[in-house]
Image (tube, rainbow, N blue to C red):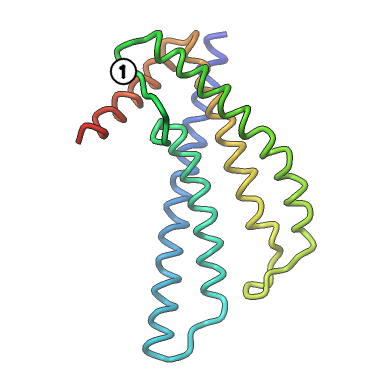
Amino acid sequence: MIKIADALYALSELLNGIARRIAAFCFLGMLSVMMLQVVARYIFASPPFWTEELARWLMVWGGLLGASCAFHTHADPAMVHPPAQVIWRQKVQAVARFVGSWVFFAPVLYFALPYVERQIGRTSEGLEVSTAWMASALPVAVGLILLHGLAGLGALISPNVLARETSYAEEFESNMKE
């Protein structure tokens, strides 16, 4: 069981790293597109029609992937962050994060998939691509959050997962004190 918990947490860490890079790329792309729009509007008086829509799509993808990264590293808003040195509280928090994320996000995922299906036949006006590409950001981010919550349960049985989760909690504590 410990090997399964470690493998699941390693998968969670890998996907979090990929999501973090994609989110950063999305925000950098959004900034670039908005700069292009401003320059085109105020210098050339002719902004491209597709820039606002592309910037919105990049913002949605970057924000949702960033939210999943924040959940993974305990940087998300929480009512209580237990002290990192109190191990039993860290384990209780792992269970609470799992239950809370699954109670809230499992229904969201359930209804997000039909939403994406409905978007397949629609085309965006500016980019002329299926709006399912933007709508798919929601189930991807929610799926990542659910995986991170499940992987965090490994803290109950795996010393490696507990150490990593504790290091995220300590990092959060030090950031809050600054």
Quadrant of res 126: bottom right
- Residue at left 48%, top 37%? 16
- Residue at left 42%, top 36%? 76
- The image shows residue 3 at horizontal and vertical percentages of 53, 12
Q: How crowded is mark 1: few (under 14 residues within 10 Å), some or many (20 or more)?
A: few
* Secondary element at image label 1: loop
Residue highlighted by disc 1: 83
- For the C terminus, which image quadrant? top left
| 45 lies above or below 168 | below
Residue farthest toward the left in the current orientation of the protein? 178
- The image shows residue 136 at horizontal and vertical percentages of 66, 51
Is 147 situated left or right of 115 in this image?
left
| 23 lies above or below 79 | below
| 87 lies above or below 145 | above
- The image shows residue 92 at horizontal and vertical percentages of 46, 13
- Residue at left 54%, top 26%? 149
- The image shows residue 1 at horizontal and vertical percentages of 57, 8
